[in-house]
Image (tube, rainbow, N blue to C red):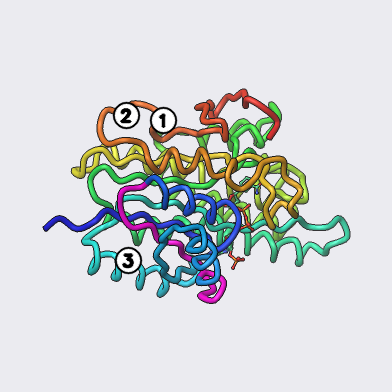
């Protein structure tokens, strides 16, 4: 007997991830897992969806905890024999204040880059071996993750953009760039290497890395013996969530629309989007040169 298909969404107890679960519960043919780092918050979210007549399943997942990711992988392998949809939604944002010390700024940069990039990368590394043919991977990037957030025609910015957008970019090189970024933040000289001089530069860097990673992932999937695996990176819009201090312009359902669509791309014959940067209105955007359809 064939095992049911299965979708996993990280960081889904609230916000965009919660709304992706809601949408997939209605439209995905298979089991949909709402995961959260905190089990109580996750189970409460499941109950909320059950009240709407939906039937999400639950599993704990803290992407900062390697053992938690390994437990999920083993569970999926034993229960379903694989994984069909992975939405890497879990993420965090810390905007530093002008008066923060360099040490505090560097500490928050480490947290943001660790969760948003390094631990998302590790989650993929652990879960990708169990992806089945036709699997769909959706990585939550941001308008802040557009390569053109590295602004200007000065030499370091040009070089940094060229390295991050290179079709030869390896994971080792990307990890090296991100470790170097954190070291430069620690020293306070990250603008000398092309990074923007902004209080939210760590979020920008982390999401640019998520996007660069996705492009690499698709190149690997193109050569993978498992057919038709697709990874895309998405800007969900400026969405009314806790991360955006509930000030966004889109509802969580609107913010989840593009990610849910990418998670549900039909099997076979999808030429595009594939390794693409997708705007919240589902337009494919040139990640390297832009332009973006709107400011956010
Ligand atoms: N909102 C926007 O305007 C916007 C714009 C562009 C991109 N995004 C991206 O969209 C994604 C979702 O953001 P959101 O706006 O929905 O934010 P949110 O409401 O703050 O939700 C973030 C979710 O991620 C979870 N999370 C954080 N660290 C985690 C970890 N280590 N392991 C597992 N889960 C973790 C949070 O769990 P807790 O509840 O336990 O904290 C929460 O469920 C993020 O990647 C974000 O960067 C958002």
Q: CB of mark 3 within 8 Å of CB of mark 1?
A: no
Q: Nearer the viewer, residue 112 or 172?
A: 112
Report, in whole angstroms, how far the alpha carbon at label 3 lies from the one at label 1. 27 Å
Residue 84, placed above or below residue 153: below
**Residue 115 location, x and y as percent?**
56, 61
| The N terminus sits in image quarter | bottom left
Residue depicted at 51% across the width and 63% down the height? 51
Relative side of 124 to 52, left or right: left
Number of marks: 3
Report, in whole angstroms, how far the alpha carbon at label 2 lies from the one at label 1. 7 Å
**Residue 101 location, x and y as percent?**
82, 64
Mark 1 — residue?
273
Residue 277, placed above or below residue 259: above
Residue 32 colored in magenta in the image: yes
Q: Nearer the viewer, residue 180 or 96?
A: 96
Point out the tag, 3 or 1, that comes first from the N-terminus: 3
Q: Please tell me the numbered disc located at residue 107.
A: none
Relative side of 87 to 294, left or right: left
Report, in whole angstroms, how far the alpha carbon at label 2 lies from the one at label 3. 27 Å
Within 10 Å of disc 2 (Cα), the crowding (few <14, some 14-19, many 20+) is few
Q: Which residues are magenta?
A: 28-42
Q: CB of mark 2 within 8 Å of CB of mark 1?
A: yes
Mark 2 — residue?
270
Point out the tag, 2 or 3, that comes first from the N-terminus: 3
Residue depicted at 51% across the width and 38% down the height? 258
Residue depicted at 51% across the width and 42% down the height? 211
Residue 186 appears in which quarter of the rendering? bottom right
Q: Nearer the viewer, residue 154 or 99?
A: 99
Residue 182, placed above or below residue 259: below
Determine whether the residue tagged by mark 1 lies in a helix, strand or loop.
loop
Mark 3 — residue?
73
Determine whether the residue tagged by mark 3 lies in a helix, strand or loop.
helix
């Amino acid at each position: 007997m064939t095992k049911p298909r299965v979708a996993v969404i990280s960081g889904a107890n609230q916000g965009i991830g919660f709304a992706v679960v809601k949408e997939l519960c209605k439209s995905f043919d298979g089991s949909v897992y709402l995961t959260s780092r905190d089990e109580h918050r996750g189970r409460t979210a499941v109950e909320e969806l059950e009240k709407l007549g939906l039937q999400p399943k639950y599993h704990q997942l803290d992407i900062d905890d390697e053992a938690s990711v390994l437990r999920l992988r083993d569970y999926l392998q034993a229960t379903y024999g694989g994984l069909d949809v992975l939405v890497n939604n879990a993420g965090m944002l810390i905007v530093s204040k002008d008066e923060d010390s360099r040490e505090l700024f560097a500490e928050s940069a480490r947290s943001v880059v660790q969760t948003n990039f390094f631990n998302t990368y590790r989650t993929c590394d652990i879960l990708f071996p169990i992806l089945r043919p036709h699997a769909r991977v959706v990585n939550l990037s941001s308008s802040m993750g557009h390569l053109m957030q590295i602004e200007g025609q000065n030499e370091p910015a040009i070089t940094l953009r060229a390295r991050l957008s290179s079709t030869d970019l390896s994971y080792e090189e990307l990890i090296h760039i991100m470790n170097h970024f954190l070291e430069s933040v620690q020293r306070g000289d990250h603008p000398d290497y092309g990074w923007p001089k902004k209080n939210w530069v760590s979020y920008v860097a982390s999401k640019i890395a998520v996007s660069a990673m996705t492009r690499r992932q698709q190149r690997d999937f193109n050569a993978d013996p498992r057919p038709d695996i697709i990874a895309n990176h998405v800007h969900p819009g400026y969405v009314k969530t806790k991360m955006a201090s509930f000030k966004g312009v889109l509802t969580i359902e609107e913010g989840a629309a593009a990610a849910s669509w990418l998670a549900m791309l039909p099997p076979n014959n999808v030429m595009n989007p594939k390794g693409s940067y997708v705007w919240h209105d589902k337009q494919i955007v040139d990640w390297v040169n832009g332009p973006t359809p709107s400011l956010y």
